[in-house]
Amino acid sequence: EATTTAKPTDLSGYTRVKQELVAPPFAPVHEQVATGGPKIIEITMETEERLMVVDEDTGASIWALTYNGSVPGPLIICHEGDMIELTLRNPVDSMMEHNIDFHASTGALGGGGLTHVFPGEETVLRWKATKPGCFTYHCAPGGAMIPYHVTHGMNGAVMVLPRDGLKDKDGNPLRYDSIAYIGEQDYYLPMDENGDYRQYEVAGDDYSDSLEAMRSLIPTHSVFNGAVGALTGEHALKANVGETVLMIHNQANRDSRPHLIGGHGNYVWESSFSDDPLQGMETWFVRGGSAVAAMYTFEQPGVYAYVNHNLIEGVMLGATAHFVVDGEWDNELMEQVIAPREFTT
Amino acid sequence: EATTTAKPTDLSGYTRVKQELVAPPFAPVHEQVATGGPKIIEITMETEERLMVVDEDTGASIWALTYNGSVPGPLIICHEGDMIELTLRNPVDSMMEHNIDFHASTGALGGGGLTHVFPGEETVLRWKATKPGCFTYHCAPGGAMIPYHVTHGMNGAVMVLPRDGLKDKDGNPLRYDSIAYIGEQDYYLPMDENGDYRQYEVAGDDYSDSLEAMRSLIPTHSVFNGAVGALTGEHALKANVGETVLMIHNQANRDSRPHLIGGHGNYVWESSFSDDPLQGMETWFVRGGSAVAAMYTFEQPGVYAYVNHNLIEGVMLGATAHFVVDGEWDNELMEQVIAPREFTT
Amino acid sequence: EATTTAKPTDLSGYTRVKQELVAPPFAPVHEQVATGGPKIIEITMETEERLMVVDEDTGASIWALTYNGSVPGPLIICHEGDMIELTLRNPVDSMMEHNIDFHASTGALGGGGLTHVFPGEETVLRWKATKPGCFTYHCAPGGAMIPYHVTHGMNGAVMVLPRDGLKDKDGNPLRYDSIAYIGEQDYYLPMDENGDYRQYEVAGDDYSDSLEAMRSLIPTHSVFNGAVGALTGEHALKANVGETVLMIHNQANRDSRPHLIGGHGNYVWESSFSDDPLQGMETWFVRGGSAVAAMYTFEQPGVYAYVNHNLIEGVMLGATAHFVVDGEWDNELMEQVIAPREFTT
Ligand SMILES: [Cu+2]
Ligand SMILES: [Cu+2]
Ligand SMILES: [Cu+2]
Ligand SMILES: [Cu+2]
Ligand SMILES: [Cu+2]
Ligand SMILES: [Cu+2]
Ligand SMILES: [Mg+2]
Ligand SMILES: [Mg+2]
Ligand SMILES: [Mg+2]
Ligand SMILES: [Mg+2]
Ligand SMILES: [Mg+2]
Ligand SMILES: [Mg+2]
Ligand SMILES: [Mg+2]
Ligand SMILES: [Mg+2]
Ligand SMILES: [Mg+2]
């Protein structure tokens, strides 16, 4: 065992706190600028296997594999230099083994090598957040089970903030009013010979059919927060003109290219918080297996669609969310000078 | 209506000018460094639905949906702080509703929400270019019509130059001798059971077949400026050694990775003109739903192929353009020391 | 002929040296910081067509087209301002014509236009490395033969180091202890009606079947260094805690997104060595038709998987390599506080 001869850690300089995880698209209570010294942040996650409807219109469903019941799993937030101490539990009535690989961590396959929990087991892993940025975490049980679990929803994001908060390229502070935490999930749902989505009795039953569908590399769905429409209509995100939103986009497997229709990425961190943010982007990029952050301050009221701008994926595969923004229209930025009317040549 | 209570705009500080739009790969007459104060730039675009041959060899064709008859639509150029005032007309004999979403603009779905014109209608939209960069514009009528119109050619680019022109990372001016405006278009042409491309009577008739083909996410064609060979042979682009070309690549839907065979991207703006250009790139990236600019100064004569460097897409799906460059060969940069000859071991 | 009137080059300032090329994943002997003046680096490559097993489990094989017998071809290293003088030989018993296009070079389609060698022919090409970075080279005989040769393994990388070596954004030197040179190869292997991989008698026999498979844009395999498992098990890469590895990832055709499971890209040069490296990345991006470099200093012992983080491609299509790292575990970075155990609620 690699760890047997390792020196014990000195934790005397750390303060212990608990972080209450919440369901997406929301963020846990947190400070943008760290106060006090480094913390050990205790969190708990439970693996949950549940039948989820992916698209009500077609009845497409999946035995999703989740952390805490949501796709994506909950957003975790800490500051550089903090430690995350995770208790991971796999309920006794689960069908499958799970674990967790934190891209933000260092060693042991991101913790994947130290956290294999079978149904009825728990484990505790502590790791230090040494690199600032948004990072994916995901289940990685080994072999083909890795993409299988990841494409069944078992992934989420950690945001490791710089202790003194986010900054522009000149070092000026950048602050947000709210976080929109959006996980894009590519599903590869097996179909029968009639083109109907297959249904399964229990988690894991779709394993060989799923692998065959996955091999095509073409998802049947690419949705935000687990299902078509999870962030539209009554579930749309809300903001006001003048407010700044930090959009955290997690995609644990497949490239994406988010775009805010009618807005921009004023500041976009595609790589990490160690690099200056990119500015004024129309469409940014999520390398498959990444979480990225993009900041925007709304200047106009109305509905903004946040999409994967492969518009086939955005519209037909499901990758659309809505922001509904209140406030006063600014005719300087845009004006409908003449409303649509008949014309003669 | 969002706009009813909005304050009227004060346009007194602006000078009105008209911009004559031209067909790709050319750029409208423009200044690289703005002179005088901010302008209101009046442009007119007409939606045109036309049967286009995509590939003469196979007879593949499409009822293209276009702005001003070309794929991509015309390049629009302004400076940061200018306003674009677009008159958009949909001829009375059109089959479909169209509108326009400018990624460069702010609010109302990029203007898409304010510009729905049915056959026989016109509208006028004015918006302020507050962010410098190259930006896609495209039709976005709603729902699956969005990717349908975009993948039928209905997209183009706006370049918003900094008022004092382009600069390198040290603030030195960067100037170009010409612009090559290249729109990459992914088409998803329906085939019959024999693998022959289907033909349709009128725009819109291919709607359900197209949606089925689009769902595969695999285009049948990915071409520059509307058709295979639109920028090769007699249509090749021209330059001289020592001249600097600004290549503007628009891809409104699908990722691309342009490469200039035998040359480089000396300066590449993948994100916006607010960021320093990337330097010395072999292959750059167009996030699907973006326009990017790359600058190169030719150092050798000869033919340069500009390709999407997924070479299957570049060669077999059509994404190839040619630059024919005149001038004197530089043996220091490259020399054929021994021409191919037989050898014996 | 473009070169006939060109002035002869003055080579008096250059020292001639030979570079002995070695098989991947290894790097030729080289200096990280150049000593002395510019060099003419003489290298020799022979085109070799050979039957390679791609996946022992399924028996999938390909008549690979190679430089010096390996997929990828050998890594070439020089410094900015040096010249590469390549002797390229095509053995008399080859079936096909080959040439070479260096993305690092300038003019004549990257040398492709000057190096067409038929079986039994040799040629010598000299070119000057004016741009620092990692660059792809590949065969490009023309037309559909271009993607055919490239997707049959005929590609590799050149690293052009700055004369004073690699640096971080503040100008501090960055040095590596070893290079891991990894070529990702997308194969499109034809199958018969039963889904079995076809076998062919000789190089080139799979041409029309391959083109049909390539047109799908979906590879059957995406492997590191030519075959599934070429860099795992007994072929895994080795390092020690505290050592720094420079991972050079070459992908001549198709986008990739490398990730080091349990580690990071501390410094990543996606564009070129002219730009500051990106920092602290979880997953970086290889624009199809690019070579990139990523630097990491190992902090923990154990096995690290280096994968294309489209995990379907990483696990099911073959894009996985392993680093086996020796050293002492650091409990501060990560600790298994409670090993998996049963729990009761
Ligand atoms: Cu799992
Ligand atoms: Cu991962
Ligand atoms: Cu339209
Ligand atoms: Cu758009
Ligand atoms: Cu070849
Ligand atoms: Cu190339
Ligand atoms: Mg580390
Ligand atoms: Mg049915
Ligand atoms: Mg990230
Ligand atoms: Mg704005
Ligand atoms: Mg036929
Ligand atoms: Mg752009
Ligand atoms: Mg050059
Ligand atoms: Mg069989
Ligand atoms: Mg490179």
Image (spheres, coloured by chain):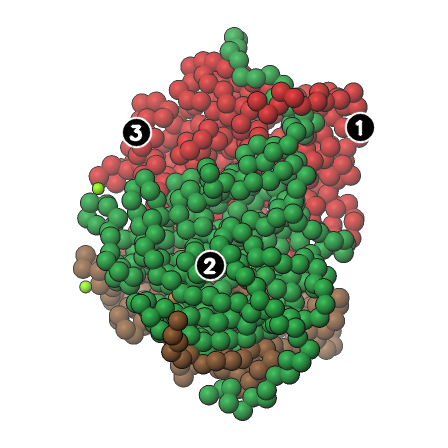
Chain colours: A green, B red, C brown
The vertical placement of B165 against A82, above or below, is above
Residue type pointed to by label 2: Gly
Report the number of discs: 3
Q: CA distance from mark 3 to mark 1?
A: 51 Å
Residues indicated by labels 2 and 1 sit on the same polypeptide chain: no
Residue for badge 3: B199
Tag 3 subunit:
B
Q: Mark 2 — residue?
A: A73
Using a 10 Å C-alpha cutoff, classify the residue at mark 3 as few (fewer than 14 neighbours), some (14 to 19) or many (20 or more). Answer: some
Please tell me whether residue B66 is drawn above or below residue C51 in the rendered image.
above
Q: Relative to residue B337, is residue C323 depicted above or below?
A: below
Q: Residue furthest bottom?
A: A5
Q: What chain is tagged by disc 1?
A: B
Mark 2 is surrounded, within 10 Å at the Cα level, by few (under 14), some (14 to 19) or many (20 or more) other residues, namely many
The residue sitting at 69% across, 51% down in the picture is: A175
Determine which quarter of the picture holds residue A266: top right
Residue tagged by mark 1? B37
Q: Nearer the viewer, mark 2 or mark 1?
A: 2
Given this view, does label 3 or label 1 mark the residue nearer the observer?
1
Q: CA distance from mark 2 to mark 1?
A: 51 Å
Comparing A1 with C306, the one in front is A1
Looking at marks 3 and 1 on the same chain, the residue that comes earlier in the sequence is marked by 1
